[in-house]
Image (cartoon, rainbow, N blue to C red):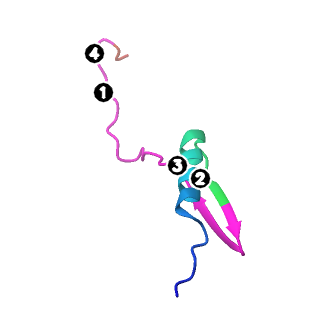
Amino acid sequence: MTTPALVKAADLKSMADVAKAKGVTVWIEINGRRVGVSPDIPSTSGEKPVEKHEDFDF
C-alpha cells in the first residue's frame, strides 16, 4: 500500500490560484513538513534592453 499524499491535488491548485492572483508564496505545514507554491515570476535577466529612438535621445 502506498503512503497517502500530504496535500491533495485540489488543495495545491487552490494554493496556486491564490499565489498567482495575489503574487505571493503560499505555504502550509503538515506534520512538520512545509509545502509551498509561488507565482510564476518572469526572469528579467534575459531580456533585451529597451531601444532608444533618435527623437528621445539626450
Q: Are marks 2 and 3 in contact (CB under 8 Å)?
A: no
Measured Cα–Cα span from mark 2 to mark 3: 10 Å
What residue is at 48 percent from the left and 46 percent from the top?
A: 41
As for residue 48 lying within the magenta part, the answer is yes
Q: Earlier in the sequence, mark 2 or mark 1?
A: 2
Q: Which residues are magenta?
A: 28-55
Amino acid under label 2? Met
Q: Secondary structure at mark 1?
A: loop
Task: Judge depth for marks 2 and 3 and give the one in front.
Answer: 2
Q: Which residue is identified by label 4?
A: 54
Q: Earlier in the sequence, mark 2 or mark 3?
A: 2
- The image quadrant that residue 44 belongs to is top left
Residue 47 in the image, given as x and y percentages of width and height:
34, 41
Q: Earlier in the sequence, mark 4 or mark 3?
A: 3
Extreme residue toward the left, this view: 54
Measured Cα–Cα span from mark 2 to mark 1: 38 Å
Specify the label residue 39 is tagged with. Answer: 3
Q: In the image shown, does 56 or 35 lie closer to the viewer?
A: 35
Image check: 21 left or right of 34?
left
Task: Judge depth for marks 3 and 1 and give the one in front.
Answer: 3
- The image quadrant that residue 26 belongs to is bottom right
Q: How many marks?
A: 4
Amino acid under label 3? Pro
Q: Are marks 2 and 4 in contact (CB under 8 Å)?
A: no
Residue 8 in the image, given as x and y percentages of width and height:
57, 64
What residue is at 38 percent from the left and 16 percent from the top?
A: 58
